[in-house]
Amino acid sequence: MNTNSDIKITDQLERELIERELGSQSLGFANDVKRVIAAVQGIFTRLQAEARKAKVVYANG
């Protein structure tokens, strides 16, 4: 799961970099909000995966 979220975040960062390099115009406030929500969801996904790993390590001693 962690690898999938890393790939999604990397893909998003690459798209944003390409947009900036090409000088494209801002896609508007709604799209900016969508990007922020996606980033936050990615962070929560990663935190949940880390919490699951921590539980397994703790349970196994």
Image (spheres, rainbow, N blue to C red):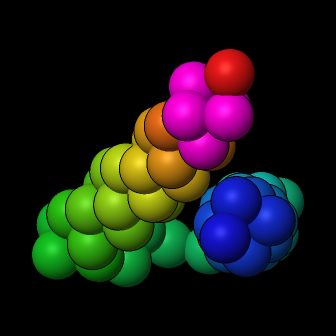
Residue 44 point in image, percent of width and height: 37, 50
User: For residue 10, what is the image quadrant?
Assistant: bottom right
Q: Is residue 45 left or right of residue 50?
A: left
Is residue 44 shown above or below 25? above
Residue 30 point in image, percent of width and height: 16, 75
Residue 23 point in image, percent of width and height: 70, 65
Residue under the point 80% across and 65% down: 3
User: For residue 1, what is the image quadrant?
Assistant: bottom right
Main secondary-structure element of the magenta-colored stretch = helix
Residue under the point 45% across and 58% down: 45
Location of the C terminus by quadrant is top right
Residue under the point 57% across and 25% down: 58
Residue extent of the magenta highlight: 56-60
Instruction: Work out whether residue 44 can be spotted.
Output: yes
Residue 34 point in image, percent of width and height: 27, 72
Is 46 within the magenta? no
Return the residue nearer the eye: 29 or 6.
6
